[in-house]
Image: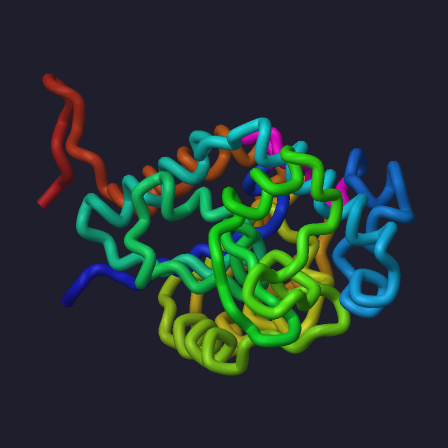
Amino acid sequence: MGKPLVAVFSGAGMSTDSGIPDYRGPQGLWRRDPEAEKLVTYAYYMADPEVRRRSWKMRAEVGALAPQPNAAHLAVAGLERSGTPVRVITQNVDGLHQLAGMPPRKVFELHGSARSVVCTACHARSGMDEALARVAAGEPDPDCPACGGILKSATVMFGQRLDPEVLAQAVAVAKASHVFIAVGTTLQVQPAASLAGMAAEAGARLIIVNAEETPYDSLADEVIREPIGTALPALLARIGDPAPAPAPGAPGPRA
């Protein structure tokens, strides 16, 4: 029998140790600045140049931090390299799972990627670095160099639909998983949050690692409230090596 498929469903809390603020947590961006939600809401972004200028400024500030994978990201990639089948479904747009070493084909980005930009008119794509260089050079709201349309990050904003193909792949992974770990997510944003319920209904062992309660805690086989940077590596070590060899001199298992 092969090793069990482990699905890791990551939310904003996964990346806070990398210096990227979460949104709904106790110190979340939207609790500190409710107006910030407009920066990632499609209707506001398209209608208001000032919202776009603030949005580009926020992206430049996050980019200047050059966030790097933290211990939790590295632990996920390490489990995959050890030979355990791992798939990542993420609500994050930071690309840190891939930077940590997860093969891109095994990472399903439900909300797109902030590492590239897309024109809302002609749909041309280019690198985020190129757009941020224009912002740094004095363009507060850079337009599409191809057609002059409004540029936005290649992320799914509020008011936009998830990519149906990516969502279908995520659903398939959730239903096929033997262990489904929801980490750093409030499990409040649908339809993504329903993946936890789908996995549990299909027979997966559901483990939730999050500081606050979630609507799916009652379905979980295990709920962990410890800090993600230490809790997730310890959990994955346990999953990857559920029956460690006894220490030298220790008695082995009974026949």
Residue 17: image location, x then y, percent: 57, 30
Is residue 198 inside the magenta stretch? no
At a point 36% along the width and 37% down the height, the residue shown is 75
Quadrant location of residue 242?
A: top left
Rendered image quadrant of residue 26: top right
Q: Residue at x 32, y 49 (%)?
A: 102
| 153 with respect to 160 (left or right) | left
Q: Which residues are magenta?
A: 16-25
Residue 23 lies within the magenta run: yes
Viewport quadrant of the N terminus: bottom left
Q: Is residue 207 visible?
A: no
Q: Is residue 139 left or right of residue 125?
A: right
Of residues 112 and 12, the one drawn nearer to the viewer in this rendering = 112
Residue 124 location (% of width, % of height): 51, 69
x, y percentage for residue 236? 37, 42
Question: Which residue occupies 73% across, 50% down?
Answer: 141
Residue under the image location 65 percent in, 71 percent down: 120
List x then y, in percent, for residue 29: 79, 40
| Secondary structure, magenta segment, majority class | loop
